[in-house]
Image (cartoon, rainbow, N blue to C red):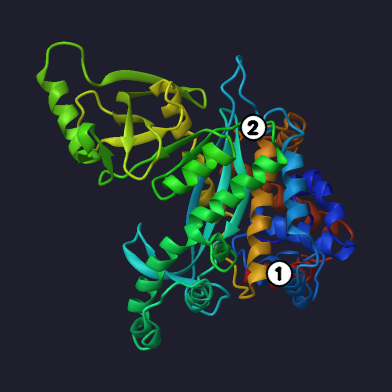
Amino acid sequence: MVLLDFPSVVKKYAPHFEGCFSPEGYLHFKKALSGFIVGENKTLEGINRMFVHDPRNQSSFNRFFNRQNFDLDGLDSKRLGMLQQLEGTRFKPRSSEEKGGVLGVDSSLLKHYGKHFDNIYYHYDYVHKCYRWCHDLVTLHYSDDSTDYPVHFRLWEPPDWEAVARYFMGKGFTVNEAKWAGRHEKPQEWRNYIRARYQDGRKKHPGVLSIYKTKNHIAEDLIRKFCAQYPDLDFPIALDNGFTSAELCEAISGELKRDYVGTLRPDQHLIMKGGKKEALKDFAARLKEEHLGQKGKPVFQKVTYNYKGGKNTAYAYCANHRVKGFRKKQRLVVFFFKEDLSGKPNFVIANRLSWYPSGILRIRRHRWPVETYHQEGKAEGLEEYQARNFEAVQTHIAFVAVAYCMLKCTAHDDALLSSIQQRLQTKADGTLPFLRRLMKAEGLLALIEFVLAMERQGHSIESIFQALVPGMAYS
């Protein structure tokens, strides 16, 4: 794929960000976005080679990413401001007329071959059941019935366990001398030991968070940042089981005064009457047996809830329970997707003890788009960076988010869609993959028009082709 001009999506929305860059940086920015949207090879070299009309030295493009002479927070604010300009993509507060938006939290592994990247780590990949070198991206994602997009995001950074240990020793914590002495000879044993000490010590000495933050702490920071920026928007927070910790949930509902809907694992425990503990999987099995065995009122009620214009159905039990690790009671929903209660049960909690299961399940469902973003973002190059510098990696991820949000705006921009459809003589369906294909078709049309124009000026097909072939052969 070669480009003779920036795609119309980039030309329409890039001016929102012009003030963030120098004139040359602004050109690099538009080039990067164009490559993320239409390019097949989304590395910096691959993107640079696409632009046969404006060949520039590769090193200047690399420096633009590596030196990061612009403010990523400012870029983030401009991106969110751009999204608020359109009715379809603006934040939608809760009201009597509409359900409003939801903030979802999730993380995704950005996989790489090799370990020579700043802050890369050997993570366990639960999807492919193996360890691999990855960066771990934590995302706070907005979703409502008409749109969804990333709000804030941050890469997790690996811990310096020696620095953590020294911090605790400075606070009077006792660190096992044998573990400390053997930290280089038995690194895994040392990491397991100091990780446990960190779990205990950070509650007494939260200053250790300046040295190392878990993904849950990063998620809390992202939520806290949003609440500071938009104090009047009380969106509920939807969490998967990796982020549904008592510590994070209590920060959301207590200090930040927001509601949450979290997901529990089957091996977590309820605290029953008399202090008896019961695993959720056993509790669900007992409820299922009661439901299938009795002839009166069913234990699991049919629940219908709306999601992005469609209706979803589940069969749910709902009541207030004490959950191990949580100081306050939780609104617990145990549900199955099938009426015969086949399949695995799902466990959801909320801090609002009066909420109906339909509302809880609707909020929970709105967490899924963050998963979709990580998948679609990878199609736009989210993990295809080759730059090893951490600042360049952060820039790459931020620009992919901008490209993604530009496409989201385009799906709700009737004037821009109409212009694209008239030029290409086709109808856009508004999905992001289709919009990317339209931008490729637009680039192809521009290429054909360029060749015809050059031929009319007397240039031979061979000479025109020779000017284009380096970019075409590479991409």
Element type at mark 1: helix
In the image, residue 302 sits, relative to residue 373, either above or below, namely: above
In the image, residue 52 sits, relative to residue 308, either above or below, namely: below
| Residue 144 placement, left or right of 169 | right
Residue that appears at 12% across and 12% down:
295
Crowd class of label 1 (few under 14; some 14 to 19; many from 20; radius 10 Å):
many
Instruction: Pinpoint residue 19: horizontal percent, then vertical percent.
Output: 87, 53
Residue 424 in sight in this render: no
Amino acid type shown at disc 2: Lys
In the rendered structure, find residue 175 and report the number of the disc placed on it: none
Q: Quadrant of the N terminus?
A: bottom right
Instruction: Pinpoint residue 353: horizontal percent, then vertical percent.
Output: 42, 25
| Residue 464 placement, left or right of 373 | right
In the image, residue 339 sits, relative to residue 14, either above or below, namely: above
In the rendered structure, find residue 49 and report the number of the disc placed on it: 1
Residue that appears at 28% across and 45% down:
268
Q: Quadrant of residue 55?
A: bottom right
Mark pair 1, 2: CA separation: 30 Å
Instruction: Pinpoint residue 137: horizontal percent, then vertical percent.
Output: 54, 58
Instruction: Pinpoint residue 351: horizontal percent, then vertical percent.
Output: 45, 32
In the picture of the structure, the residue carrying the numbered disc 2 is 427
